Amino acid sequence: MKLLHLDSSVLGPYSVSRDLTASIVKTLTEQDSSIAVSYRDLAANPIGQLSGLTLAAAMGNYDASNDEATKADLALGGEVLQQFLDSDTVVI
């Protein structure tokens, strides 16, 4: 089973929600050691908002081959989406 653990609190080590999600993940992995955990900290490494330009490029209406920022947005968006879709469980 694949588990995606997401944290997003800007409070870092002072965050109660981070403690709670960590506790949930710990409990689940103690119950089943075969769980593969992926972790993403959205406060430390934020994902930008979807822009019109990125959406146009994703739909094939904009050639991003010479636009490094848009290519990077598309790559990150694809990576994050695939990580989410591949997960059986998501802990937020």
Image: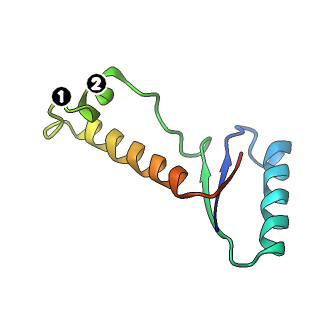
Q: Residue at x 81, y 43 (%)?
A: 17
> Alpha-carbon neighbours of circle 2 within 10 Å: few (<14), some, or many (≥20)?
some
Q: In the visual, does 69 lie left or right of 35?
A: left
**Please, what secondary structure does the residue beneath circle 2 have?**
helix
Q: Residue 2's x, y, as percent?
A: 62, 65
Residue in front for this viewpoint, 13 or 67: 67
In the displayed structure, would residue 34 be above or below residue 2? below
Graded by Cα atoms within 10 Å as few (under 14), some (14 to 19) or many (20 or more), the crowding at tag 1 reads some
Q: Secondary structure at mark 1?
A: loop
Q: Residue at x 53, y 39 (%)?
A: 46
Q: Which residue is mark 1?
A: 62
Left or right position of 90 against 62 = right
- Residue ID for mark 2: 53
Q: Residue at x 14, y 40 (%)?
A: 65
Query: Can residue 15 be seen at all in this image of the molecule?
Result: no
Q: Are marks 2 and 1 in contact (CB under 8 Å)?
A: yes
Q: Residue furthest bottom?
A: 33
Identify the coloring.
Answer: rainbow
Q: Nearer the viewer, residue 50 or 43?
A: 50
Residue located farthest toward the top when viewing the structure as drawn: 52
Q: What's the residue type where badge 1 is placed?
A: Tyr
Query: Residue at coordinates 33% horizontally, 21% vertically from top-left?
Result: 52
Image mark count: 2
